[in-house]
Amino acid sequence: MNLRQLQGKEIINLATGEKLGLIAEVELTFEQETGNLNSLLIPVEKGIFDFLGEEHFLEIPWDSIVKIGAEVIVINLGNEE
């Protein structure tokens, strides 16, 4: 699977049913030595004045991904949000 195949998929947290964002808005982190994917970083809004401060991200460890489907990626973050 490549990044192009992930683009446009919606990310859903299995634990809460919450929609977390689209892959188009996601940054990826990699292990430097192996090149393996570590996590997805999704920008999140913390409040009405976010545009004044720094951007906040929700980090989703790659091993928390439960299923990658045709339109969605299901993850399980439990109550760690």
Image: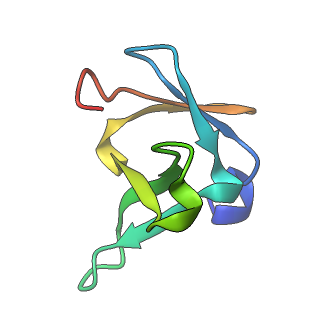
Tell me residue 28's x, y (percent). Answer: 47, 66
Residue 59: image x %, image y %? 35, 51
Which of 79 and 32 lies nearest the eye of the viewer? 79
Viewer-nearest residue: 70 or 58:
58
The reply, left or right, for residue 80 in relation to residue 69 is left
> Which scheme is used to colour this image of the protein?
rainbow
Left of 35 or right of it: where is 21? right
Task: From the viewer's side, name the closer residue of 50 and 67.
Answer: 50
User: As displayed, is residue 25 above or below residue 67?
Assistant: below
Q: Is residue 37 left or right of residue 34?
A: right
Position in image of residue 10 (x %, y %) = 67, 36
Whether residue 67 is situated above or below residue 14 in the rendered picture: below
The C terminus lies in quadrant:
top left
The N terminus lies in which quarter of the figure? bottom right
Report x, y in % for residue 42.
50, 52
What residue sits 42% from the left and 57% below the top?
56
Q: Residue at x 70, y 41 (%)?
A: 9
- Number of marks in the image? 0
Above or below for 41 versus 54: above
Residue at the bottom extreme of this rendering: 33
The residue depicted at 28 percent of the width and 84 percent of the height is: 32
Q: Residue at 37% x, 15% y: name it.
A: 15
Splitting the image into 4 quarters, where does residue 48 fall?
top right
